Image (tube, rainbow, N blue to C red):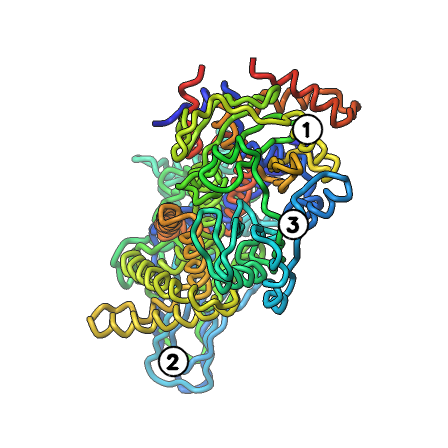
Amino acid sequence: MISKAAFYLVVLILIITGLSIIWLRHTELNIPILPGEQKSVWLIEARIDFIADGGPVRVSLDLPEPQPKFRQVSEQAASTGYGFSIIEVPDGRRAEWTRRHAAGLQTLYYKLQMVADSDTRRISQSKEVPEPRVVYWKELQETAAQQLVDQAYEKSSTPSSFTRELSKQLSAPKPDQNASLLLSEYDLTTLLMRLINYAGIPARVSMGLELQDFRRYQPLKSVLEIFDHDRWIPVNPNSGVHWSPENILLWHRGGKSLLDVSGGVHSEIHFSMIHQTMPAMDLARLQFNEGGLSRLSLYNLPLEEQSIFKLLLLLPLGALIVTFMRIIIGIRTSGTFMPILIALSFLQTNLIPGLTAFILIVGIGLLLRGYLSKLNLLMVARISTLIVLVVYLTAMISVLGHELGFNIGLTITFFPMIIIAWTIERMSILWEEEGSREVMIQGIGSISVAVLSYLCMRMESIRHLTFNFPEIHLVLLALILLTGQYTGYKLTELKRFRVMRNKT
Amino acid sequence: MWISPFRLRRQGILGMNRRNVAYISRYNSRSSFPLVDNKLNTKLLAEKFNLSTPRLRGIIRYQYEITNFMYQVEKLSGFAIKPAKGAGGKGILVIKSRNGDVFIKSSDKPIGCHDIKRHLSNILAGLYSLGGSQDIAIIEDLIQPVEMFEKLSYAGVPDIRIIVFKGYPVMAMLRLSTQASDGKANLHKGAVGVGLDIATGRCLHAVQYTNRITHHPDTNIVLDTISVPDWQNLLLLAARSFELTGLGYIGADLVIDKNSGPLLLELNARPGLTIQVANGIGLLPRLKKIEQLDPDLTPCATDRVDFAMKAFAAI
């Protein structure tokens, strides 16, 4: 016999393992703990128009990189007649459309779903420190730029603070002579980018998309980014401070081109977007193609098997309920786990029709069994006879129900016929040996456990948890093990031993 | 209506869960269960150990043997048919007399030869056996109750249930059948349970359906004055069943026959808990007392009975 301590350790390990896998699955795969949770999703569509000149066409579009504020859920391209693929190039991902011959106005679409979801791990870390761009100035400007940079350099210590100081000078209400000179030549963002690069700090202008609901024909906006330590940081050109707007999606970063079209002219790109809400579960499902934890889930099975497992995974809960009802409460049932099977069939038939049919079949079965007991049959033959009768009864009830307009026909076949035949047999023997009172007690006990299991199994949140977090069964297992060690009184024993009240 | 669990605990009442976890699964080795779950095994073993049991008159193992049944009981006027693996008294048919082909059950109801054969085939098919497995029917001599018991019981023979823990008899009760229990000695069917003083075999307390009573509901005999004869031998027989099976926690069912004295009827590896109600006292303190004894000591059955009679005396 293993010691108590080892037993409780095992139980504890089961519970901790179960709960931590649940937590992992929740955080890593974004499976919601509760069903019906909604997430806000941006559906963004990039539309590329160009006029093709009749020859081979190749269109290449830069695609957004992983973002700190947004998580990409899905992407797709719609463009008839074009070959489409997504290519990984050293600078990032690009979408590429190709076609042998195309002439006239062409329209290509690329659609993308993004969830607003902040996750610091996704902030792209550049492995190599990029080189600052070489900047050339006109003679006069160079001096002004040098002075501006020197002033800012004096007052700062890091790339970020340098940018801040520089931006302060440029965006002051009354910029000084140097700033005014340069601002007359360049716009603020470009100027800042040039100056920062000039000072030896990598900076670039990226293109971002401002997300606003129901906007169409949106262009990309320029966003200044500086390289600090190990990552690119977007900066507000007006204040120079670190800037991470909620509604800006950085689409196109760094020096490479946003859109290349060969074999066409007058190319244009527009973006339109809408904001939707989507069940978090559907969203999580869209990402299950990855490896790791999602490999260990049931979603990879064919749908048909998934639906079987959805039902099967409810069984442990039923087992826990039966264990609890029998050990802690002390309810007597006819056949230990018969109530769970009945509860499972109630799930198919719904409660009231199922319950009615069940009581009807068992009731008529008991009457017929009364006659069978006079026939002096061997037990196996008698139960086989009962099975035939039960099947017959089921068919009769279905036909009758159909004629009367109750549509219980198909669902009634979900009843476990053999279990019902056994139940009838057991109840009948019980009736002969212990009398009708015991039959009522066990019958009502079985039905109430079945109904309770049914009510639990039907709850959306429970179905969601048991299917999407199969590891919850480790916790159930631990609870069942614990119940198995319960040595206290059953609730019904408090009644059974009530005469002991009169003793001192 | 209800009793508080703390109060039950204070009175040392053993509950079903505790009995299963702390006593049955701890002291009863699974491999010895077939010895007691099969009455035929128990009987043969008891004969080997020289423990007296009701005389075996016949065994029916196969369906075809049922036709021979009438020959086996030809010379017997009364007999009992039992399923070897029956539980809780299920499937026991007691015939106390016969009138040609009509047999009279212990409850005075007549039963035909045909019905007995049906009963036998039910037994063989495993209707009464644990888990529904195939079974054997045993035919035994009818017990002739001693006079004082004969008038006590509504029908059938009163039997004595003794809980034997590690070979020590710890609690005893007399079971009297009633009209309500159809002549059977099962307490949950309405038989009367009479708690017995381990020291003397005298009645302590009597219950029916967990209600305290002072008179037998059918025969109206005062129960408080009952004193079981041959008490010490009875306890000894029960205590010796420990050596027989090696099971630490058993319920021994015994009867007293007019001619043969105390007989071992059967052993039960999962004895019920109502004996506590019949005695008006909990089992736990007594079981704990035995558990506290030096485990190295292995006294003989007589010493164990002496110990129990002293330790568990009512007053």
- Residue at 55% x, 65% y is A88
Of circles 2 and 1, the one toward us is 1
| Residue to which mark 2 is pinned | A80
Residue A287 visible here: no
Q: Which residue is nearer to you in this view: A12 or A358? A: A358
Q: Report the Cα–Cα distance between label 3 and label 2.
A: 80 Å
| Residue to which mark 1 is pinned | B233
Q: Report the Cα–Cα distance between label 2 and label 1.
A: 101 Å
| Residue to which mark 3 is pinned | B38
Indicate the secondary structure of the residue bearing disc 1. Answer: helix
Query: Which image quadrant for residue A356?
Result: bottom left
Q: Callout 1: residue from which chain?
A: B
Asked if disc 2 and disc 1 are in contact, CB closer than 8 Å, the reply is no
Q: Are marks 3 and 2 on the same chain?
A: no
Mark 2 nearby-residue class (10 Å; few <14, some 14–19, many ≥20): few
Indicate the secondary structure of the residue bearing disc 3. Answer: loop
Q: Look at label 2 and name its amino acid.
A: Thr
- Residue at 74% x, 44% y is B47
